[in-house]
Every structure is written in C-alpha cells, then in structure tokens.
C-alpha cells in the first residue's frame, strides 16, 4: 500500500475552504480516504470552549468526506474519527493513529489575521552586515577602540573561547549591500533581512548601545534609508532585527539605570538589592529587559514612537521585524508576559503599515506562541532544520551542533518524515507555512559543511527548503557553497573578488528553485501528502486545485518505485537528466537514481 492511500487532511485549499475564517462563522472541511478503504463513517471532533463536540461528515464520492467546522474559539482545534466496523482511528495533524492521543497534535484553524502574502510567498535572504560587502566609503571610517580590525580575506576567528571572536571587524556596510542587490536577486530572494544595524560593541551588534540610530560604521541612518529605498524600488521587502529580550550593557538605558537606582530606567531591567541583574544566559554584557514594566513596554514595543514603531516609519520604512530571542522575551521565572509583548509588537506594526510581518526567533518548540495574534511565525529550526540536518548530515562532517551537546544524528527517511509530521501537527498548518525553512543561519554551521562538502546533497537540501511548506530563508553565502563549522565560523566574508571559489551550479539551483516556487500555486498554497519514504528517499505531493506536484528527494542513489499517479511531466531536477513519468497499470514508475538528486513533476492523481 502506498502512503498516498492513507486518510488525509491538511490546512490547504483542497481540504479547508478558508484558512483565516472569522470568529462565529463556519468553514467547510474535507477528508480524503482511498476509494477502497472500507470507512463506514467519519466524525469531525472539535472543542467548544474546551468541551469535545462531534459533527457528522458526509461522503461525496471517490473516498471524499465533507463537513462543517464551527469557528467558535479564536484558535479552533479539530480532528477526525474514522470508523470501520468495530475499528476506529483518529486522523490528527500528526497523521493517523489507532489509539487515543492528546489534543496537542490536532489540526488548528485560526480566526486571527494571517501573515501577509508577501511574507509567506517570498524568499528571505539573510545578511550579516559586517561580512557581506564593503563599500568604498568604509575605508574612511575610523575603527572603534573595541574592535580587532581584519582585512576582507583574513581568516575568521570563531572559537567561543577566543575573546577576539565577537570583536573581529571586517567593516562591511549597508551601501555595500545596495551594491550587491543583483546577486540577491540571482539567489531568488525578494525579502532582505539584515541582522541588527544598531550600534553595539561587537561585530554582531546584538548588544545594542542604543535603538535610536543606525551604527555609523554601517553608514548611519542615511545608509539604512538608502538601502530601504533600493529594496523597495525592486518591489521587494526589508526586515529589521530587534533584540526585545535584552540590550547591551553599554546601552544608554542600562548605563543610566546602573549608575542611579532612582533613575526611571531602573525598572527597565531586573536589578536585585545588591546591584546584580538578570541577563541572557549568564552573559553580563546582555542585561535582560523587564517587559512587565509598562514604561519599558512603551519604549520598546507599544506605539509609533517605540523602537518597534519608529523604524517602520519613513524614511526607513522597514516592513517588519525578526525578533531576536523571541522565545525568552517577557519570560523570567514566574513572570511570563511573552504573549502580551508579541501582541503589542504586532499591533504597533499593524497600526503603521498595511501588511507588516513579525517573525520570532525560536530555536526549539514554538507551539502555542505562533497560532494567535502575536508572532506570525518562527525561524523553524525544530520543525525543519533539525530533521533536514539529521537526514543529510555526513557522519564525518566537522559541523558542530546548534544548541545541543551531541552531534547531529544521521537518521533514516522514515524517522525524518515522522519528525516533520509531529512538528506540523504541533505548530499547525498556517503557522508552519508562515515560518522560515532554514538550512543554516549566522548561529549555526553551514549546510555545505554539514553535508560533508557534497554539492549534490547540498542542492537536495535546498530543494527541501524551497519545496516543503514554509518560507525559504537563505543565509548569504549558502547559495555559492560557503562553509562553516559553527555559527561564528559561518560568518565568513562573501568572496566577491574570488568568483572562482563560488559553486555556480548551486547558485543556479537556488535561483531555479525560487522561480519554480513562485510559478506554482501548489508550492505557495498547496497541501502536503507524503507519497513514499525509505532510508535514502523521501517523496511528497504538493496538492492544489490549480495543479499538483510530485517531489522526490534522494540523499543517495536508490531503486525506482511505483506511485498510484496517472502521469507526470518533469519540471526540474537538481542534477542533469530527468524524464516524464509514464503510467502503466499500477501507476507511474519513479526511476532509479545513481546518486543524490531532487526532481519535480507536475502530476495528476489517478483518484481524481
């Protein structure tokens, strides 16, 4: 039996009429079962103010069942009870199970406004300003006393134990970014996200000294306004990066608060009676701010004059924010105002811009933080990065794990698909589709290093990033094969003067995958049905009323296999070759492969 024979539902238009219905309305839902599956009845179970309620589904032919879901609560949970004689199964967001399970994996429909279309349909390109590009104007800027100056081709200092690691300064600036926007376009991106541009006594600038201006080392406010204008002139969007969890210990608020216990900024932080203070993960240079304090909240996230608000207005016109350490923001011991902060940031943004995006950094479980009226989505490390890393990691890779004490495990395809299922069920369809698919970032090892330098496997990873539900976020340099064993090493300067070091085939693959994603409704709004899995192969369908696609990803060579589909027109392959799929009595035969590759076909389901 194929995986395509399993009962299925997801939050895409094939199965759910409206992913953002209004509270108090009803939405039509559909379940697909195989025509030969002897299902006697399907019941839709939802919760009405946390009380289970059942609604009967009705067969509509060909294995399809249809029902109506009342949207009674802002986030409505639901699942399906499948009855076959004396046997019963649940269909939840995590798949089909033959025993009773908690509600945490139920499907969700959310009555709050969704992420803006541009934020969900676009491709994000992440720039670490100090290492991306250096304009001629950078030569005239004085290196600050805290910095360790470096030439563009110098080796990066990256060991956490080396005090030079956060201080090594290459001098990249914002006008340098403007000069290389054509390259961003070649990588397929249309959303530019830069790590912080505020002054800070480090190359990463997450230890801000103020939120009132752009670092003069980057060109100052005028350069940021020029970058914003250049991005918008292309019809693109720009995102800022804001640390709502902490400031630097040189920040003007903190210095005033530390110097005078009666200073009004004192309540912005968590000082104890001895003058000590809470900070991020024990780093005294990153004092934690107190969002339980209304004055801090007003300064940081509430209203047009807050930090969140000011940079969304002219002349900067930022289109939204990536919120650093969003998972810890507003949380300290018994204090938890995280949801209040998220809602305030989003309200402020919505009051100033027609369609802003607010994305949370969240490197573990964002369940419950992203299905309401706060963060639109998250940087989906747990639900995307870790399963991809686990499937594609070369056991001999020197890549170090991100946030764990042990190396990334190498797991077979079945375990990886189970991971995808669990996280999709926990986060929900809409939050998953609005979250970022990340192969790496400035905080993690590079994907090229993790796969042992294998360009073909890297391109398979890129295919997963662009063709599974979620928003691709490309860390500058991934598209040309840059390497790095951990986050700080991954911040190597872009080798603009050394095109011979670039992997041009992989750059072409990124551009082609982005173009394919934009051209097909199935990749922007389509559902997800797993079609085939073995240790080295994962295949899935992206379904949409305008047409469906089959994607087959292989981490190594493997045998062919048959799928119950009518036909398939080959659209794209990460490696040379690829042919149409021709039907026989059992369906279509997906051909064997001699090595790693990813292919995409336009297909028709035989059951349609």
Image (cartoon, rainbow, N blue to C red):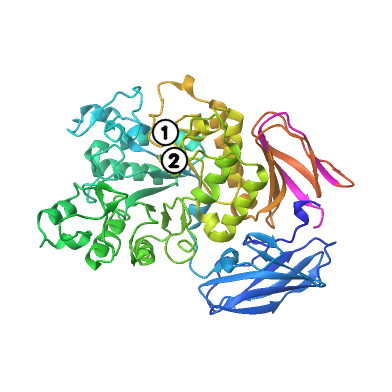
Q: Are marks 2 and 1 in contact (CB under 8 Å)?
A: yes
Q: Does the magenta segment cover residue 600?
A: yes
Q: Crowding at label 1, few (<14), some or many (≥20) Cα neighbours within 10 Å?
A: many
Q: Which residues are magenta?
A: 587-608
Q: Where is residue 256, by image quadrant? A: bottom left
Element under disc 1 = loop
Side (left or right) of 507 relative to 553? left
The answer, for residue 357, to whether it is visible in the render is: yes
The numbered dot on residue 441 is 2
State which quarter of the image contains the C terminus. Answer: bottom right
Report the Cα–Cα distance between label 2 and label 1.
8 Å
Residue 538 in the image: state x and y as whole percent: 68, 43
Residue 254 in the image: state x and y as whole percent: 18, 53
Side (left or right) of 589 relative to 426? right
The answer, for residue 428, to whether it is visible in the render is: no
Side (left or right) of 184 relative to 169? right
Element under disc 2 = loop
Q: What residue is pinned by disc 1?
A: 490
Q: Is residue 509 above or below residue 117?
A: above
């Amino acid at each position: 039996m194929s995986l395509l024979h399993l009962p299925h539902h997801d939050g895409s238009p094939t199965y759910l009429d409206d992913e953002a219905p209004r509270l108090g309305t009803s939405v039509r839902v559909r379940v697909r079962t195989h025509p030969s599956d002897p299902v006697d009845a399907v019941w839709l179970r939802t919760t009405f103010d946390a009380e289970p309620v059942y609604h009967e589904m009705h067969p509509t032919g060909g294995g399809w069942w249809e029902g109506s879901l009342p949207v009674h609560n802002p986030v409505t949970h639901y699942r399906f009870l499948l009855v076959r004689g004396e046997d019963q199964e649940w269909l939840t967001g995590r798949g089909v199970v033959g025993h009773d399970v908690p509600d945490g994996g139920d499907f969700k429909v959310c009555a709050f406004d969704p992420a803006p279309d541009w934020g969900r349909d676009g491709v994000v390109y992440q720039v670490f300003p100090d290492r991306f590009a250096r304009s001629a104007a950078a030569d005239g800027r004085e290196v600050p006393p805290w910095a360790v100056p470096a030439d563009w081709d110098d080796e990066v200092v990256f060991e956490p134990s080396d005090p030079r690691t956060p201080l090594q300064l290459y001098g990249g600036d914002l006008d340098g970014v403007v000069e290389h926007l054509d390259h961003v376009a070649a990588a397929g991106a249309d959303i530019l996200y830069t790590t912080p541009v505020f002054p800070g006594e480090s190359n990463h600038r997450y230890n801000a000294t103020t939120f009132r201006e752009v670092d003069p080392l980057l060109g100052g406010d005028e350069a940021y306004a020029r970058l914003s204008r250049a991005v918008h002139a292309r019809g693109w969007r720009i995102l800022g990066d804001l640390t709502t969890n902490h400031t630097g210990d040189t920040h003007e608020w903190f210095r005033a608060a530390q110097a005078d216990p009666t200073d009004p900024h004192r309540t912005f932080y968590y000082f104890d009676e001895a003058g000590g203070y809470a900070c991020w993960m024990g780093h005294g240079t990153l004092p934690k701010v107190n969002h339980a304090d209304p004055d801090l909240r007003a300064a940081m996230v509430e209203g047009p004059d807050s930090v969140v608000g000011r940079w969304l207005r002219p002349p900067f016109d930022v289109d939204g924010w990536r919120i650093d350490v969003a998972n810890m923001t507003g949380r300290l011991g018994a204090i938890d105002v995280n949801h209040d902060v998220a809602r305030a940031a989003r309200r402020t943004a919505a009051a100033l811009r027609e369609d802003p995006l607010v994305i949370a950094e969240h490197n573990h479980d964002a369940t419950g933080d992203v299905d309401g009226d706060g963060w639109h989505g998250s940087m989906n490390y747990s639900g995307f990065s870790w399963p991809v890393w686990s499937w594609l990691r070369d056991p001999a890779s020197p890549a170090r794990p991100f946030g764990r004490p042990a190396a990334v495990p190498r797991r077979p395809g079945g375990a990886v698909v189970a991971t995808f299922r669990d996280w999709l069920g926990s986060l929900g369809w809409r939050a998953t589709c609005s979250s970022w698919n990340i192969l790496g970032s400035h905080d993690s090892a590079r994907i090229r290093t993790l796969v042992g330098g294998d360009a073909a496997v890297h391109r398979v990873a890129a295919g997963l990033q662009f063709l599974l539900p979620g928003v691709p976020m490309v860390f500058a340099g991934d598209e040309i094969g840059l390497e790095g064993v951990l986050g700080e090493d991954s911040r190597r300067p872009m080798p603009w003067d050394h095109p011979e070091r670039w992997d041009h085939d992989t750059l072409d693959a990124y551009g082609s995958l982005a173009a394919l994603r934009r051209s097909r409704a199935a990749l922007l709004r389509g559902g997800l049905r797993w079609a085939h899995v073995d240790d080295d192969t994962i295949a899935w369908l992206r379904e949409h009323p305008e047409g469906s696609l089959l994607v087959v990803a292989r981490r190594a060579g493997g045998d062919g296999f048959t799928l119950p589909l009518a036909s398939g027109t080959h659209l794209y392959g990460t490696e040379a070759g690829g042919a149409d799929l021709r039907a026989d009595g059992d369906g279509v035969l997906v051909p064997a492969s001699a090595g790693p590759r990813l292919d995409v076909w336009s297909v028709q389901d035989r059951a349609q």
